[in-house]
Image (cartoon, rainbow, N blue to C red):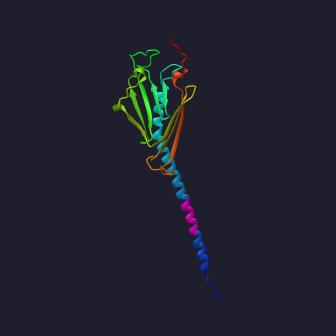
């Protein structure tokens, strides 16, 4: 009765196979978790870069200056918005002549995937004199921006940003997420019920 203690070859192969499958499963879970964390980090990075731009536009739109029937906001082609601003003191506004009031214009440049901000000190006859030296690129890697204004005067902004919008075509990957920010703004001029002779 010569009995040997130990594992047979088949038992060893089955054990090695099970350990290999467990290692593969743990590796797949680890890779998936890292990818999820990286995607969340990339999305947070894109959102933190795009949010201040949206906040700046919202501030200017909120401070738009006009009357209830002329809110001081002009939207051209859904990708450009011009905002009439109150003149800086000691200059007093001249109702209802808005031609001498300063303007701010935000423009989405689809070829450069950017948003620019420009200023004009006045718009005699409704034609603004934009200063090319004061054009400021305030955002890059913007895939799309649309402006809209309802009959109630509320302005809608929809902005889509990416980590690298320059990629052609921009792939939707965990390394280049698409982040969409959307808001509605009520200019203070829409709440005025002023009429002037």
Seen in the image, is 125 located left or right of residue 181?
left
Q: Which of 121 and 36 is in front in this view?
A: 121
Image vertical order of residue 177 relative to residue 184, above or below? below
Q: Residue at x 44, y 32 (%)?
A: 106
**Considering depth in this image, is 160 or 99 the residue closer to the camera?**
99
Could you say where residue 57 lies in the image, as x and y percent from the top left? 47, 32
Q: Can residue 6 be seen in this view?
A: no
Q: Which residue lies furthest to the right in this view?
A: 1
**Of residues 144 and 91, the one drawn nearer to the viewer in this rendering:** 144
Residue 150's x, y, as percent? 57, 28
Q: Which residue appears at 44% of the width and 19% of the height?
A: 98
Image spot of residue 12 (x, y percent): 59, 76
Secondary structure, magenta segment, majority class: helix
Location of residue 131 in the rendering, given as x and y in whole percent from the top left corner: 35, 29
Q: Quadrant of the N terminus?
A: bottom right
Q: Is residue 42 left or right of residue 10?
A: left
Residue 114 found in image quarter: top left
Q: What stretch is highlighted in magenta?
A: 19-28
Q: Does the magenta stretch include residue 23?
A: yes
Judge whether residue 117 can be spotted in this image.
Answer: yes
Task: Examine the image and state in which quarter residue 124 appears.
Answer: top left
Q: Look at the picture and state if 125 lies above or below 167.
A: above
Q: Is-magenta flag for residue 97?
A: no
């Amino acid at each position: 009765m010569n009995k040997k203690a130990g594992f047979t070859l088949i038992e060893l192969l089955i054990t090695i196979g099970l350990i290999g499958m467990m290692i593969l499963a743990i590796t797949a879970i680890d890779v998936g978790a890292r990818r999820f964390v990286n995607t969340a980090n990339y999305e947070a990075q894109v959102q933190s870069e795009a949010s201040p731009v949206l906040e700046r536009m919202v501030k200017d739109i909120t401070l738009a200056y006009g009357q209830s029937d002329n809110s001081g906001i002009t939207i051209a082609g859904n990708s450009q918005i011009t905002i009439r601003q109150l003149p800086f003191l000691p200059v007093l506004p001249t109702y209802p002549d808005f031609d001498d009031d300063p303007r701010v214009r935000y423009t989405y440049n689809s070829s450069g995937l950017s948003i620019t901000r420009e200023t004009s000190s006045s718009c005699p006859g409704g034609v603004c004199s934009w200063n090319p030296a004061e054009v400021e690129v305030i955002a890059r890697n913007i895939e799309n921006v649309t402006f809209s204004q309802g009959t109630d005067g509320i302005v809608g902004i929809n902005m889509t940003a990416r980590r690298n919008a320059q990629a052609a075509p921009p792939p939707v990957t965990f390394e280049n997420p698409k982040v969409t920010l959307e808001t509605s703004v009520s200019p203070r001029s829409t709440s005025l019920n002023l009429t002037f002779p």
